[in-house]
């Protein structure tokens, strides 16, 4: 009788192994891992060494992408800080207009940069060896930090609008932004419940993982759209020409060039993150070769 | 000796088969296809029938997603037409302000809706049987239509700006939009050259396919960001309150609610398209199980 891989079931495969012919694809490393699990114990010593070798061989472009991602992320945060310091008077948490300036800084830092770093964490090959649990906690921690920054950033704009008697949540920018934060909070709570809590059943985790990955990328897409529309909106309001004594946005004064470039940088950062996430050969090799490797918190890694 | 799947190489595998343990992942259908190709010819009649059976079994949620995608796409085009007819005087291709109204209609129709439909074409299970070439031509044709619509949409706004002495390409919205169209044109030209022309080497196609898929999703992400920022910008300019006798944007008059909802609809359409593209079990099963199945134009399908 043939197994799902077209090989005789008796040819080295253990009946305790999870079936490989599921709806989920298998990367080369997962196939190698499955091969290792199918071997007789005496053969494992040599096979287990070959997995990191393959991983390292294909990780140079990945490290270059991660380095690019880190540089772009730092440049985004620096850029949004410089924009609001240089052209909008800096930062304060009081009833002056300076409180608003925290909004772009915290949204870009939280909802884009820290979020992006947290998303690609599992793609860092250094995290592939040993227990996954610390990296799951680091992923959840980075995302919590991103969420807190975003929520404080929302507080800044809500309080600024209240002080200046401007209605909240009227623009499409604000609709997209608030949806992004709401989905992010939901994703974080469901993610912790499904992938970290001990009571979460394996079937639920297998069901949720592709949705978690897709929703994660979707939230980043929404964040990019919110950032682009937000920078655009801020420049329209700030550079009114003769109305407020500035050069108009359409004349592309230095602030407009700088903030437009910042927007472009944010877009490039987002696309690099999505590139890292979409490359299947850069995924973390799971010992089980399946999503069942998402063991809940407090469960033994080698169970 | 063991093969890359952990099975004995002699267990039904043909030495002419491409190695499965490559950097590309394998879906369940690809594994089944490989299994079929590894069988003795006498066993193929039963196995070949099982592939469409598996495909149909898993295609109900896919068809529901495709139906949702089609409905959302039609709603987006209808919505952007109604917005510009109802609140901005309709359409004309002359020196009146009505020429501008073609811009949102053509950009949403081309760069988002037709583009999205073209992107998910290979995911329609009806296209999976038989020769792939007609569907490759349909994919390239749909994308060409999308590109032409987008370029005409750009002409509308460039000519409108020229007539009204407004500098072109100053806003972040325009930067993101023009980058999106430029990348789209490049993607289309490279795609035709690599995947349709007979002189294109297989190695180039294998190298380019993941980049083609990633850049395709990235262009859609850029288009969504351009649409959101464009609708936001248009509403800021159109709803100035006492300045031009309208209710201000911040008071959320009916036009603002309608156009904001249109923007939300565009975002949801884009995310549904990205969901369909990201689900690996919905990918077109390739007979070779690899990107080498991307045969160039004029080459025989059964070569």
Image (cartoon, coloured by chain):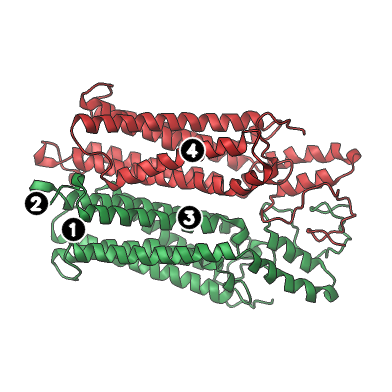
Chain colours: A red, B green
* Residue drawn at point x = 81 percent, y = 61 percent: A6
Measure how far apart labels 1 and 2 are at the Cα level. 20 Å
Residue, disc 1: B161
* Residue drawn at point x = 67 percent, y = 41 percent: A201
* Residue drawn at point x = 68 percent, y = 37 percent: A295
Marks 1 and 2 on same chain: yes
Find numbered disc 2 in the image and state the secondary structure of the residue it sits on: loop
Would residue B87 be visible to someone looking at this image?
Answer: yes
Residue, disc 4: A116
Residue B217 tag number: 3
Front tag of 1 and 2: 2
Marks 3 and 2 on same chain: yes
Measure how far apart labels 3 and 2 are at the Cα level. 39 Å
Name the foreground residue: B258 vs A282: B258
Residue, disc 2: B244
Judging from the image, mark 4 belongs to the subunit labelled A
B227 sits left or right of A120 in the view: left
Circle 3/circle 4 CB separation < 8 Å: no
Measure how far apart labels 4 and 1 are at the Cα level. 37 Å
Name the foreground residue: A227 vs B83: B83
Find residue B258 and report its horizontal and vertical position in percent.
26, 56
Label 2: how many Cα within 10 Å (few below 14, some 14–19, many 20+) = few
Find residue B281 and report its horizontal and vertical position in percent.
62, 58
Q: Quadrant of residue A169 in the image?
A: top left
Can you say which quadrant of the picture contains the C terminus of chain A? Answer: top right
Q: Is residue A278 above or below residue A185?
A: below
Q: Earlier in the sequence, mark 3 or mark 1?
A: 1
Circle 3/circle 2 CB separation < 8 Å: no
């Amino acid at each position: 009788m043939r197994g799902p891989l077209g090989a005789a079931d008796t040819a080295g495969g253990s009946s305790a192994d999870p079936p490989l012919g599921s709806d989920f694809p298998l990367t080369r490393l997962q196939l190698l891992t499955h091969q290792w699990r199918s071997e007789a114990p005496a053969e494992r010593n040599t096979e287990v060494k070959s997995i990191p070798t393959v991983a390292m061989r294909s990780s140079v472009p990945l490290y270059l992408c991660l380095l690019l991602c880190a540089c772009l992320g730092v440049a985004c945060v620096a850029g949004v800080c410089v924009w609001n310091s240089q052209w909008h008077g800096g930062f304060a948490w009081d009833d002056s207009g300076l409180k608003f300036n925290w909004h772009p800084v915290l949204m870009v830092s939280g909802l884009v940069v820290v979020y992006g770093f947290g998303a690609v964490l599992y793609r860092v090959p250094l995290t592939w060896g040993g227990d996954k649990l610390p990296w799951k906690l680091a992923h959840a921690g980075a995302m919590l930090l991103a969420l807190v920054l975003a929520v404080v950033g929302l507080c800044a704009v809500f309080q600024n609008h209240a002080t200046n008697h401007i209605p909240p949540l009227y623009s499409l920018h604000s609709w997209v932004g608030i949806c992004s934060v709401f989905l992010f909070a939901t994703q974080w709570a469901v993610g912790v419940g499904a992938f970290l809590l001990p009571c979460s059943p394996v079937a639920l985790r297998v069901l949720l993982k592709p949705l978690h990955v897709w929703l994660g990328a979707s939230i980043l897409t929404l964040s990019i759209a919110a950032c682009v529309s937000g920078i655009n909106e801020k420049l329209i309001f700030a550079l009114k020409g003769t109305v407020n004594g500035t050069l108009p946005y359409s004349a592309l004064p230095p602030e407009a060039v700088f903030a437009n470039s910042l927007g472009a940088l944010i877009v490039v950062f987002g696309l690099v993150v999505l590139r890292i996430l979409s490359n299947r050969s850069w995924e973390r090799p799971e010992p089980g070769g399946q999503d069942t490797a998402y063991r809940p918190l407090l469960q033994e890694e080698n169970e």
